[in-house]
Amino acid sequence: MEVRIGVTDVTRELVLESTESRDQVVSLVRSALGETEGLLELTDERGRTVLVPTAKLAYLELGEDSVRKVGFGKR
């Protein structure tokens, strides 16, 4: 699933492909926002970790959960 993260005072958004489901990402965001000095931690499909302080979090855009297609099948 594609996750786009807007950070305040930064012109570019962070984009990552996550292996987690939409519900898991929403749960991580909600728990990070509930902490006093929250830190949102997401891991992409290659194992890289992105940390964003929740005080700087402007928005989060979640793509659809999708299964990666393999092969040359017909549409």
Image: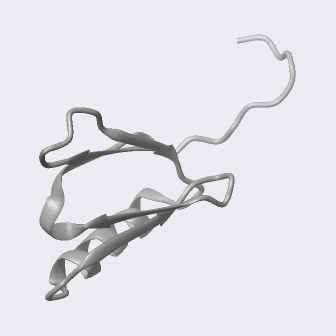
What residue is drawn where x is 18% and y is 58%? Answer: 57
Q: Is residue 63 visible?
A: yes
What residue is drawn where x is 60% and y is 58%? Answer: 48
Q: Is residue 65 left or right of residue 10?
A: right
What x and y, as percent, mark residue 42?
46, 64
Name the outermost residue toward the top. 74
Between 3 and 64, the residue placed more toward the observer is 3
Q: Is residue 48 left or right of residue 22?
A: right
Above or below, 39 relative to 60: below
Name the outermost residue toward the front. 9
Between 60 and 73, the residue placed more toward the observer is 60
Indicate the colouring scheme. one colour
What residue is drawn where x is 50% and y is 59%? Answer: 21
Above or below, 7 relative to 29: above
What residue is drawn where x is 24% and y is 74%? Answer: 30
Quarter residue 22 falls in: bottom left
What x and y, as percent, mark residue 23?
39, 65
Q: Is residue 1 visible?
A: no
What x and y, as percent, mark residue 7?
21, 49
Total number of numbered discs in the rendering: 0
Q: Is residue 74 left or right of residue 55?
A: right
Name the outermost residue toward the bottom. 36
What x and y, as percent, mark residue 67?
65, 42
